[in-house]
Image (cartoon, grey):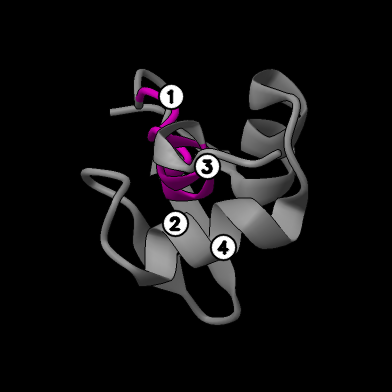
Amino acid sequence: MDYMTSAEAAKKWNISQRRVAVYCKEGRIKGAALRGRMWMIPSDAKKPEDPRRTREQGMNIG
C-alpha cells in the first residue's frame, strides 16, 4: 500500500497540515498510522468531512 505524509495530504486536500494531524489523531482517516513523529496516510484515503461546517449550517445567525 502506498502512503503519503500529512504535508502531502494537506496539499492534496487544500487544508492545513495541523488539521490533517487532528483528523488522524481523532481516527477520522482510515488506515492512518503514526510512525515516529510523522503521520502516514494511505494514498487513496478520502478527506473527512469538517464537523465545524456541519454545525454552522444548522445555526441560524442573524
Q: Measuring 51% from the left and 49% from the top, which residue is drawn there? A: 52
Pick the quarter of the image with the N terminus. Answer: top left
What secondary structure is marked by label 2? helix
Residue range (magenta): 46-56
Q: Are marks 4 and 2 in contact (CB under 8 Å)?
A: yes
Name the mark nearer the viewer: 1 or 3: 3
Distance between the alpha carbons at the discs numbered 2 and 1: 15 Å
In the picture shown, does residue 24 fall above or below 36? above
- The part of the image, by quadrant, that contains residue 15 is top right
Q: Earlier in the sequence, mark 1 or mark 3?
A: 1
Q: Nearer the viewer, residue 39 or 19?
A: 19
Distance between the alpha carbons at the discs numbered 4 and 2: 5 Å
What secondary structure is marked by label 3? helix
Q: Measuring 46% from the left and 71% from the top, which residue is drawn there? A: 35
Please indicate whether residue 54 sits to the left or right of residue 29 in the image.
Answer: right
Q: Nearer the viewer, residue 51 or 37?
A: 51
Distance between the alpha carbons at the discs numbered 3 and 4: 22 Å
Tell me where residue 32 appears, x and y as whole percent: 33, 52
Name the mark nearer the viewer: 2 or 1: 2
Distance between the alpha carbons at the discs numbered 1 and 4: 15 Å
Residue carrying label 2: 23
Residue carrying label 3: 56
What secondary structure is marked by label 4? helix
Pick the quarter of the image with the C terminus. Answer: top right
Kind of residue at badge 4: Ala
23 in magenta: no
Kind of residue at badge 2: Tyr
- The part of the image, by quadrant, that contains residue 46 is top left
Distance between the alpha carbons at the discs numbered 3 and 2: 19 Å
Q: Which mark is residue 21?
A: 4
Q: Which mark is residue 43?
A: 1
